[in-house]
Amino acid sequence: MRILLIEDERKISAYVKRGLEESGYAVDPVYTGREGLDWAESAPYDVIILDILLPEMDGLSVCRELRKRGDRTLVLMLTARDTVDDRVAGLDAGADDYLVKPFAIKELYARLRAITRRAGEAPKSTVMEFADLTLDTRSHQVRRAGRVIELAAKEYSVLECLLREPERVLTRTQIAEHVWNYDTYNQSNVVDVYIRNLRRKIDDAFEHKIIHTVRGAGYRLSLDEMD
């Protein structure tokens, strides 16, 4: 596995690079946001490990630019802050997961295994459907009744998770583990925030609501009125 490491703190970069290389990963370290963008464009990577606080161009901007360019390389964001707003900002920028500093190298390994495992779970068909809702996993285009619905990156991922098993109740834990896989999500309402956003964009303008709360259990896509 080839990894692009974008981290300006040289000691942290050296620590991560050494640990990953000892486990058989190939690691290219760079130290600024703009340098990272150039490297990401010049060679294929399996994962980009991206710090948020970077010189020249911060990690959130780097991630947004990668996604704008159509680069779907897995991104693991590094952050020194652990608030809900910080998490949501990183995930909305297009990151696949995040890791809070300081961290043990074993935790980094676990996060890398988790996001690469999730990436391999994509369905063979590129279009997922439920009622009049469609999601194209290739173009990331979402439509309801033919109308294009613009979603942020993690709104899309939460919806994709629900669409994988329509009519099944998914707990907040199951949704979070599929989309983010971070261990401390139980201390926040981040799943509820994304569900509210999805309802506003997908259900509010339509008579029939399809995103439902199963009280005390979780959420599911259903044609039955449940709230």
Image (spheres, rainbow, N blue to C red):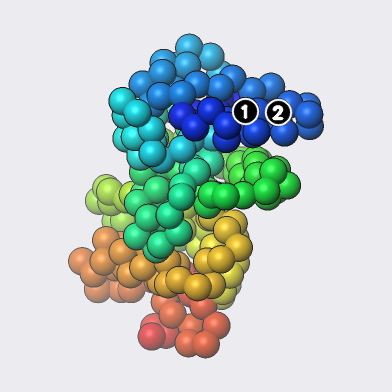
Residue at image position (67%, 48%) is: 104
Q: Which mark is residue 18?
A: 2
Q: Is residue 145 above or below residue 36?
A: below
- Residue 188 versus residue 60 in the image, above or below: below
User: Which quarter of the rendered picture does the C terminus lie within?
Assistant: bottom left
- Closer-to-camera residue (227/171): 171
Q: Position of residue 169 (x, y in %)?
A: 56, 75
Quadrant showing the N terminus: top right
Q: How many C-alpha atoms fall within 10 Å of the one at disc 1: few (<14), some, or many (≥20)?
A: some
Local secondary structure at mark 2: helix
- 61 and 226: which is toward the camera: 61
Count of marks placed on residues:
2
Q: Is residue 145 left or right of residue 162?
A: left
In x, y percent, where is residue 190? 42, 66
Amino acid type at mark 2: Arg
Q: Are marks 2 and 1 in contact (CB under 8 Å)?
A: yes
Quick one: 51 or 217, which is closer to the camera? 51
Does residue 23 appear left or right of residue 100 in this picture? right
Name the residue type under label 1. Answer: Ala
Residue 70 rendering spot, x and y as whole percentages: 39, 28
Per the rendering, the mark at residue 14 is 1
- In the rendered image, the residue lying farthest to the front is 11
> Cα distance, mark 2 to mark 1?
6 Å
| Residue density around tag 2, few if under 14, some if 14–19, many if 20 or more, within 10 Å | some
Left or right side of 67 for 205 = left
Q: Which residue occupies the extreme top position in the image?
A: 42
Using the rendered image of the protein, determine whether residue 197 is visible from the camera's viewpoint. Answer: yes
Identify the residue at image location x=59%, y=57%: 181
